[in-house]
Image (tube, rainbow, N blue to C red):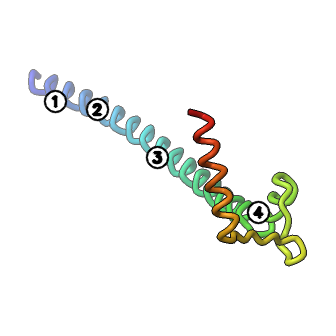
């Protein structure tokens, strides 16, 4: 009779352990499924952001922003200004700088 009670207790304990393990297994499976769903969502969002990034970086868009926001324009020979220095201009600039330095002292 004593053996039967020990065996009954062992069966009840193992049944309770089995229920706990099954519950934990199902809980972990649902967490894994949620994690996979989140990973797919993040992967899709990453792809969408990559497409948006490529769209923002096109040369036509950069040119449009430069024109509209920075008020820049295309370079043409008609609006190009060439700056040249001659030796006489360089001497005049150097003399002006020397005069300005003496006046500051």
Rate crowding at label 3 as few (under 14), some (14 to 19) or many (20 or more) other CA atoms within 10 Å: few
Closer mark to the observer between disc 1 and disc 3:
3
Q: CA distance from mark 3 to mark 4?
A: 43 Å
Q: Which residue is mark 2?
A: 17
Closer mark to the observer between disc 2 and disc 3:
3
In the image: residue 33, left or right of residue 91: left
The image quarter in which residue 20 lies: top left
Q: CA distance from mark 1 to mark 4?
A: 80 Å
- Residue 44: x and y, percent? 63, 57
Q: Which residue is mark 1?
A: 7
Q: Which residue is mark 3?
A: 32
Is tag 2's residue or tag 1's residue first in the polypeptide sequence? Answer: 1
Q: CA distance from mark 2 to mark 1?
A: 15 Å
Residue closest to the eye, 77 or 12? 77
Rate crowding at label 1 as few (under 14), some (14 to 19) or many (20 or more) other CA atoms within 10 Å: few
In the image: residue 63, left or right of residue 95: right
Against 24, residue 81 (above or below) is: below
Residue closest to the eye, 12 or 96? 96
- Residue 69: x and y, percent? 84, 52
- Residue 63: x and y, percent? 80, 65
Label of residue 58 in the image: none
Is tag 1's residue or tag 4's residue first in the polypeptide sequence? Answer: 1
Q: Which residue is mark 4?
A: 62
Is tag 2's residue or tag 3's residue first in the polypeptide sequence? Answer: 2
Residue closest to the eye, 34 or 70? 70
Task: Give the structural element (helix, strand or loop) at label 2.
Answer: helix
Give the residue at x 42% y 41%. 28
Against 28, residue 66 (above or below) is: below
């Amino acid at each position: 009779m004593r053996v039967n009670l020990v065996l009954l207790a062992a069966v009840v304990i193992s049944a309770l352990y089995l229920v706990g393990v099954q519950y934990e297994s199902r809980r972990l499976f649902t967490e894994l499924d949620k994690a996979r769903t989140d990973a797919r969502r993040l992967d899709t969002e990453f792809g969408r952001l990559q497409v948006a990034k490529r769209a923002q970086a096109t040369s036509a868009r950069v040119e449009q922003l430069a024109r509209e926001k920075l008020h820049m324009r295309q370079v043409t020979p008609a609006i190009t200004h060439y700056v040249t220095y001659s030796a006489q201009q360089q001497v005049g600039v150097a003399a002006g700088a020397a005069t300005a330095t003496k006046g500051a002292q």
